[in-house]
Amino acid sequence: MEPRLKVDELLKTLAVVKEMKKGDDGYIHFRAEYYGPGQIKDSYKVLSYQSLAFIAVEFENSEIAKNEAMRLNQYYHRNWLFDEVRDEPILKDLVVYQLKAINPNDKSPWVPRHHPKGDSPPGGAGGGH
């Protein structure tokens, strides 16, 4: 089993993303009871990319994160669930392109349309749309 991805490692991976604070415009209030057992207490992050907010929730392992992604029809990568992403193509591009996150319910995987702003494709410089 893969080791857990810690919150600071996640944020380094998502360098183009800003962490939001309560009171910020567009902040999504986190409700722990909405997510199933196995979440790591107080490890969630409310994040923003191009003025779109989403939630990252850390779980004990990737199997639990995957099960929650299935239940919520959202995306996961390793032990993290990304909520409020599914209906936002820009956010889907970000988590699929940068993290290789997947939605286990998708029959045809999402193909990113745009590279996240300010980033070049993994494995090389440059790139296009």
Image: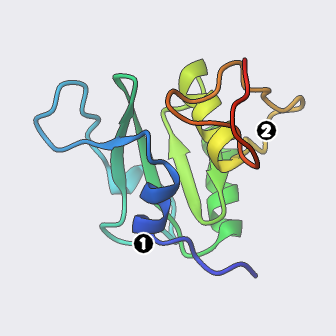
Q: Can you identify the residue that label 2 sits on?
A: 105
Figure coloring: rainbow
State the image coordinates of residue 124 (x, y, percent, origin top left): 74, 44
Classify 41 as above or below 106: below
Q: Earlier in the sequence, mark 1 or mark 2?
A: 1
Q: Can you identify the residue that label 1 sits on?
A: 40
Say which of 27 and 111 sits in front: 111
Q: In which image quadrant can residue 91 be found? A: top right
Say which of 5 and 59 sits in front: 5
State the image coordinates of residue 8 (x, y, percent, origin top left): 40, 66
Residue at image location 41% in from the left, 44% down from the top = 55
Q: Classify 10 Å Cα crowding around label 2: few (below 14), some (14-19), many (20 and above).
A: some
What kind of residue is marked 1?
Ile
* Element marked by disc 2: loop
Q: Are marks 1 and 2 in contact (CB under 8 Å)?
A: no
> Which part of the image, by quadrant, shows the N terminus?
bottom right
* Element marked by disc 1: loop
> In the rendered image, is residue 88 in sight?
no
Classify 102 as above or below 127: below
Q: Classify 10 Å Cα crowding around label 1: few (below 14), some (14-19), many (20 and above).
A: some
Say left or right for 85 vs 100. Answer: left
